[in-house]
Image (spheres, grey):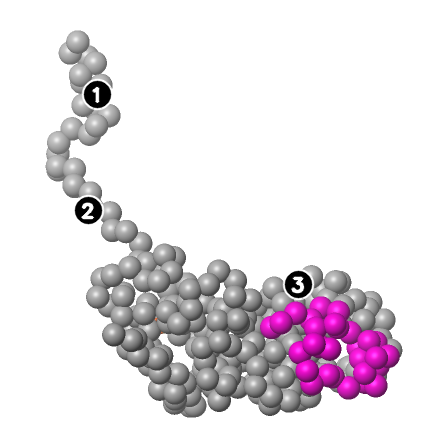
């Protein structure tokens, strides 16, 4: 018997309905980045840092250097204090200034619209290049960050060790019409309910579609061992009231020998 294909339409619809209203965290790139350039630089800043730090640093940076020409003219030392919140800020300052200079020198100040040239820019890997396509240009791509990698494995649609492998599997199995909403909805889910530690499966609108949600509900092992609930220890037998403590029993034993 063939397995039913994963119902991406139902999952993305349910997530979209969940996060349409309410006081939820919103991925920075979805609502704030104003140009392909800001998507590109914002995604480089997001590497190895928390979302809130990326938000703060991006706001400060783009208020002063909103485009490639202005950032290409900057000295890294001018950029560093603006992006300090992201960690590794000295390296990142050098990288994003170099990226802006390459955009001016090789691409006439424009951010490329294809993966291959994007991947030749400093600091740009598959996730960043795909983010530029999706958020900068509205071109289908599959950006896989830690949220997408974790949730795809929790859902049971991939069984992968690295985000690169996850990207490859999702590209092969998710119909292209779902690629654009896939990242922002999974990232938002990862920031709010399907968080790295202790996902809130009881409040999750896609638990029925999720291998982890179903496994935890039925007391089975989830696909990722780290999502299993901690093993229960047997309750400790309470010491009898008024009885001798272990220390006094030992002392008494020694005295009687
Ligand atoms: S059921 Fe739990 S693990 Fe699955 S997507 Fe929802 S919150 Fe995440």
Quadrant assignment, res 99 = bottom right
Which residue was labeled with disc 1?
Answer: 250
The disc label shown at residue 235, or none: 2
Whether residue 125 is in magenta: the answer is yes
- Residue 194 in the image, given as x and y percentages of width and height: 40, 72
Give the residue drawn at x 82%, y 76%: 102
Q: Is residue 180 above or below residue 201?
A: below
Left or right relative to 256: residue 115: right
Count all numbered tags in the image, as a single digit.
3
First in sequence: mark 2 vs mark 3:
3
Viewer can see residue 245: yes
Q: Earlier in the sequence, mark 1 or mark 3?
A: 3
Question: Counting other residues with Cα less than 10 Å from the Cα at mark 1, is it few (<14), some (14-19), or many (20 or more)?
Answer: few
Q: Which residues are magenta?
A: 99-127
**Pointer 2 or 1: first along the chain:** 2
- Disc 3 on helix, strand or loop? loop
Q: Quadrant of residue 229?
A: bottom left
The residue that disc 3 covers is: 87
Left or right position of 79 against 84: right
């Amino acid at each position: 018997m063939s397995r039913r294909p994963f119902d991406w339409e139902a999952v993305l619809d349910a997530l979209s309905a969940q996060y349409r209203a309410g006081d939820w965290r919103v991925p920075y790139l979805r609502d704030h980045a104003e140009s392909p350039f800001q998507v590109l630089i914002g995604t480089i800043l997001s590497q190895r840092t928390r979302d809130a730090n990326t938000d703060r640093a991006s706001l400060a940076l783009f208020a002063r250097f909103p485009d490639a020409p202005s950032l290409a003219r900057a000295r890294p030392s001018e950029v560093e204090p603006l992006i300090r919140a992201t960690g590794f800020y000295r390296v990142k300052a050098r990288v994003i200034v170099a990226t802006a200079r390459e955009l001016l020198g090789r691409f006439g100040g424009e951010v490329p619209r294809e993966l291959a040239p994007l991947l030749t820019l400093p600091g740009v890997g598959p996730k960043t290049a795909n983010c530029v396509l999706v958020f900068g240009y509205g071109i289908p791509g599959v950006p896989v960050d830690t949220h997408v990698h974790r949730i795809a494995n929790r859902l049971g649609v991939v069984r992968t060790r690295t985000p690169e492998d996850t990207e490859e599997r999702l590209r092969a199995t998710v119909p292209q019409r779902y690629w654009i909403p896939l990242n922002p909805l999974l990232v938002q889910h990862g920031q709010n309910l399907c968080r790295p530690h202790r996902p809130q499966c009881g409040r999750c609108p896609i638990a029925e579609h999720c291998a982890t949600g179903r496994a935890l509900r039925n007391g089975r092992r989830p696909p990722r061992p780290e999502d299993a609930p901690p093993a229960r220890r047997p309750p400790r037998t309470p010491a009898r009231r008024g009885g001798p403590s272990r220390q006094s029993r030992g002392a008494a034993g020694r005295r009687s020998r």
